[in-house]
Image: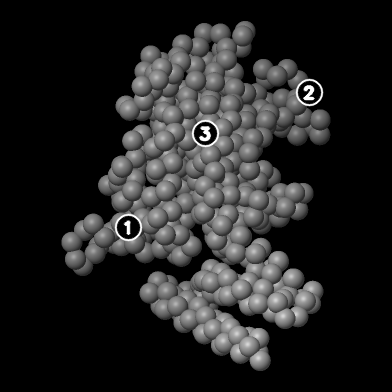
Amino acid sequence: MGGSMIGSWLGHLGALIAVLVILWSCLKTVQLKARTDNLQILLQLVSFYARYWFVWLLLWANVQLLYDNQIIYWLLIALSLLYIYMSWVEPNRLRVSRFSINLTASATYQPATDISLAASSSKYITPQAAKIAVLSDIHIGIFSNPRQLARLVKCLNRLDVDAVLILGDWLYQATTLDAHLSPFKTLNKPCYTVLSDADTQQVVNDAQNSEPASNMQLMNILPTFGIQLLPEQGLRIAGINIIGIHNGSTMDLPRVIEQQRSAGQPLVIATHDIKQLEANPRTLSDANNDTLVIAGQTHGGQVNIPILTPLMVRALTGNKLAAGLRRPDTAKQSDNHPKAFNEDDKPSKRYQVWVNTGIGMTGLPFRFNCPPTIDVLTIQVQTADA
């Protein structure tokens, strides 16, 4: 009798939570004032807030096991734990990874004397190495909250790096930024960003302005929070030239690469989406192992299943690399030749690529085996005769 009453009470509680999840999702959808895709946004929000219902399901299945040990309840427990982990736990497991990447420069390479742009750094960093915190795809919006950004900035402040580099895709169904971006005002390191196609088209409410709030482009709002656009003409960080490619624009990139090669200087190219640079084979045809391209966009697939996820990322986004480092191809011709060919007689990609797994989420609010990650890249320069 007692078990029946508890089961009935829990059943009513589950129905109430389900109704509240749907109503809250509808309210949030209306608040967004989206012109299109309202149904899609509603379904995404339902899947996001459904984690509260799965907490109830976990409790309900455990109670049922006390009275009836059936395999279905064990399966419901496993399903609930998986959903809670993918939608709640892992998206908040901010991870810091560290990796060293070597770039080759000519024997005449002369590093700059400005050691670091980080005014607060007290450690000496040799001119041949730059330490950069790389992150991408923050996606402020329906799946994020200000506490996550505050925790992100606190983590960045603890890192011993020369600068922070954010690789675009700032928003996802967002209209206001002030509460989310305000923690960046406390960042104790220089912060630079490149913009994606979506970023350059975003118009948001700037809550810092007087009422009524005016619509401003994202690129005009970010500098008010201390986030500078990475110049397309480049800047030096610890002696290494880093240029920003915004909105996939590659018009002058071949000329810049040729200038760097002529000067014997290594080059780092920051962009949001690597496939935009590689769409035209001529864009990076002169890039060699003195060039590193840093990109985001893939999210690492968000749900990382070995073998399957890289195939899905390639099919859905066109990117051949889901995350991590892609080293230069092995060429038939001399390694010093920028237009060598690989074993399939296709132009070799003689440059290195690093892809960040991102911070936020799009589509469905899940991450599995792919936590939000800050990559601390130590970029070292070695001369050709080293």
Q: Is residue 241 left or right of residue 4?
A: left
**Secondary structure found at label 2:** loop
| Quarter where residue 206 is shown | bottom left
Q: Earlier in the sequence, mark 1 or mark 3?
A: 1
Percent position of residue 14, x then y? 57, 82
Q: In this view, does 169 lie above or below 321?
A: below
Of 27 and 273, which appears nearest the observer? 27
Q: Can I make out residue 35 in this image?
A: no
Mark 2 sits on what residue? 332
Image height check: is 178 above or below 23? Answer: above
- Position of 107 with respect to 228 (left or right) is right
Q: Which type of secondary structure does the marked residue at label 1 adopt?
A: helix
Rounded to the nearest angstrom, the CA distance separating label 1 from label 2 is 54 Å
* Classed neighbour count for the residue bearing mark 3: other residues with Cα under 10 Å, few (<14), some (14–19), many (≥20): many
Q: Is residue 238 left or right of residue 348?
A: left
Q: Mark 1 points at which residue?
A: 179
**Residue appearing at x 58%, y 83% in the figure:** 10
Report if residue 187 is visible in the image: yes
Return the disc, 3 or 2, that comes first in the chain's sequence.
2
